[in-house]
Amino acid sequence: MALHTRDGGLVMPNAWDGLSALMLADAGFEAIATSSAALAATLGRGDGRHQVTRGEHLAHARLLGRLTGLPVTGDFEDGYGDTPEDVAATVEAAVASGLAGIGIEDTSGNPDQPIRDFDDAINRVRSAVNAAKRRIVVTGRTDNFLQGRPDLDDTIRRLTAFAEAGADVLYAPYPPDLDALVAIVTAVAPTPVNVLISPADKVLTVAELQKAGVKRISLGPALYTHAMEALQQATKALVAGDLTTATTGISFERINDLLTRGANQP
């Protein structure tokens, strides 16, 4: 929690495989996270529909932590289970796997009713907190804005209840604008707030988000999609017969250097 409560907080980028985690560690980031969307995509599956198992995500998170030696927060969708007891079991497994943090969303995996009822959502976060016993940072997250429910009042109500249930960090991806973000930060203070890149209407700088009171900035699948855009451009060049553009990238010497560092982690 110390990284969340210090002046400025932290930027916590999301890795999707061992090499991306090592590159982020080499760049000097102090903590990293998984991305459920990026992980699902690497496995050829969809995000938020219970298509990735708890065991798969735990193994993935353990790999990132082992290679980098950094604190890893798991973006664990709805906690991988139908009941609050299932969420508690996921938290226990995350603690046993050495994770530093875990996020629990109020999503359901049901496209017809993507956001869980208020009481159910709160009970799941409370169960996560009780299981955590302060051994792991618990982030309570509402996906109202992501799921087409632009209700700022309900979002603040949920986040406030998550804080009252004991969540260490609060998170509502893509509030509509800076005013909404500031309203959230103010309403739940002093509990730290995570932001996914920026409000929905404009990408701000790290300094601007810090000025607004944000304590943690995550990137979700954005770095992964950035890398996939580079791959898409390379494939277009290849189709056009441009081998030079298609094969430009970092050297295997650089890759092997990073992998060696990961293998030598204590």
Image: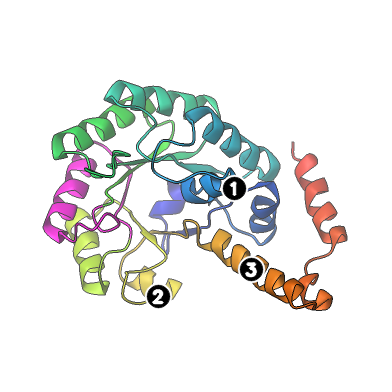
- How packed mark 1 is, by other alpha carbons closer than 10 Å (few <14, some 14-19, many 20 or more), is few
Q: Is residue 65 left or right of residue 142?
A: right
Q: Magenta stretch: residue 96 in it?
A: no
Mark 3 element type:
helix
Q: Is residue 122 left or right of residue 131?
A: left
Mark 1 element type:
helix
Give the CA distance from mark 1 to mark 3.
Answer: 15 Å
Mark carried by residue 232: 3
Give the CA distance from mark 2 to mark 1.
Answer: 26 Å
In depth, the one of 98 and 56 nearer the eye is 56
Q: Quadrant of the N terminus?
A: top left
Range of the magenta residues?
144-173
Q: What residue do we see at 35% from left, 37% from top?
A: 78
Residue 127 image offset from top left, x and y in percent: 28, 27
The residue type indicated by label 3 comes to Gln
- How packed mark 3 is, by other alpha carbons closer than 10 Å (few <14, some 14-19, many 20 or more), is few
